[in-house]
Image (spheres, coloured by chain):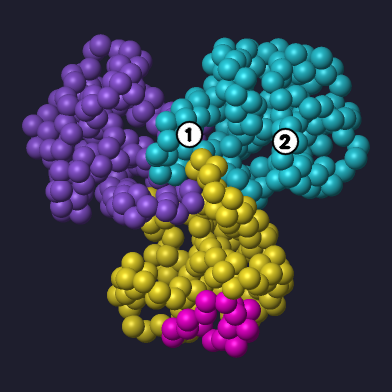
Chain colours: A purple, B cyan, C yellow
Amino acid sequence: MVVILITGGARSGKSKRAESRARGFPGRPVYVATAEALDAEMEERIARHRVRRGTDWIEREVPLDLVPALVASDGGGARLVDCLTLWLSNLLHAERDWEHEVNALAATLLHLKSPVVLVTNEVGLGIVPDNALARSFRDAAGIMNQIIADVADEVEFVVAGLPMKLK
Amino acid sequence: MVVILITGGARSGKSKRAESRARGFPGRPVYVATAEALDAEMEERIARHRVRRGTDWIEREVPLDLVPALVASDGGGARLVDCLTLWLSNLLHAERDWEHEVNALAATLLHLKSPVVLVTNEVGLGIVPDNALARSFRDAAGIMNQIIADVADEVEFVVAGLPMKLK
Amino acid sequence: MVVILITGGARSGKSKRAESRARGFPGRPVYVATAEALDAEMEERIARHRVRRGTDWIEREVPLDLVPALVASDGGGARLVDCLTLWLSNLLHAERDWEHEVNALAATLLHLKSPVVLVTNEVGLGIVPDNALARSFRDAAGIMNQIIADVADEVEFVVAGLPMKLK
């Protein structure tokens, strides 16, 4: 049905914007968290997002298997995937074939019945990182964002909490 | 009255744009510098900005106490605050409660008579920094930008010297 | 004639967009590569770009002398310069006067007959780099982008493969 991609920098208000877009659809929304609470910094961030979102969401922790999770939850309310860059990072750590997974996600998004709102990050607008791993990651994130933006019905770029319509 | 937030990257033309917006209001403009000339790099940057601006500005150096400075200078020409990210950095170094200060600034901006043009930086669009302090700073800067953008009447994002209207 | 500047982050789809803009003009397009294949990472990137572009382009490797190359190739199809940030980096390594060269490029662009599409990078939207050289580079890149954007007829900012019109 409808696929919306929300991109932006760290603490730009992307998640809040995505929550508001997901709530705009009928049905009980599903929160698909790609984050795992592996350290105190992440735990605190997850807890803060949960407080803001409210308790009426169905919650799923999906660090890796996003495609099956979206298929399994299809037919109900909108799904909010927060966020794709963390999913990509999880795929890389697990040594999965990220290009294959991203293309499979794009193909799946074209055939779902319930809306999907996806959050991602822009990470390529700073100085080239010294470290080769960081360079590969930002390349992969940029390629992923292009692939998902290409199949999305709407794309928004959020700066200082304010969305700009890209598509 | 009018609150304008100008955001963008390093050397994107934010200050020049903000100066032009501040000059668009009647009265002698007030330049509120949050920078202190602590090293040669900063001194040179401050001097260059002053040359471009011209000598008809009232100048104030306000590294920390922005709210009292805006209240004290209210009733005359437009104030240009350049820039909020440096102010935030000064607050953190001085171990002030930055969230309290940012919220106090937002509340004050709603009640001033003369226009205020504020410059800030987008710092969250690169790779996640390795260092925890840099991560906290970019989180704080993103939150500050959202809070100030929320009370601003206009927000512009400047890229390559060209403003995009966000609000 | 027509000068188009395409800016954006790493892997944002800038080059692809610029290729499509350059192909929109009549005549055989000229690909002006500022990259030199100095290591395996660059070689692979150059090869991938060539595959996407197709084989009908006239190719020129111009790491430094962009102004003479644009003058020499004038009168035929559109020139695609990919990219200005690498050219700037080459100028700095060669200890050339980059400000002089950038201003000479801007002056030349105003007087060419055939279209020029230039790709550049936004590198100033992350955390301030620790290292002084990286700080000077991002300052220089920001200044260069402002100077070229000022003489361009069109400027686009590409995010996730999608262009936003800045000018």
Q: Is residue C73 magenta?
A: yes
Does residue C154 lie above or below A155 as drawn? below
- Tell which of B148 and B90 is nearer to you: B90
Q: Mark 2 points at which residue?
A: B38
Instruction: Please determine whether, in this image, residue B99 is positioned above or below residue C139.
Output: above
Residue B107 place in picture, x, y as percent: 63, 12
**Is A102 situated above or below B102?**
below
- The furthest residue to the right: B56
User: So how many labels did they put on this image?
Assistant: 2
User: Magenta region: which residues?
Assistant: C58-78
Report the residue at 18% width, 34% height from top.
A63
Residue B20 image offset from top left, x and y in percent: 77, 41
Task: Please name the residue shown 54% across and 16% down the image.
Answer: B99
Residue carrying label 1: B134
Position of the C terminus of chain B, as image quadrant, is top right
Distance CA(mark 2)–CA(mark 1): 20 Å
* In the foreground, C113 or B136: B136
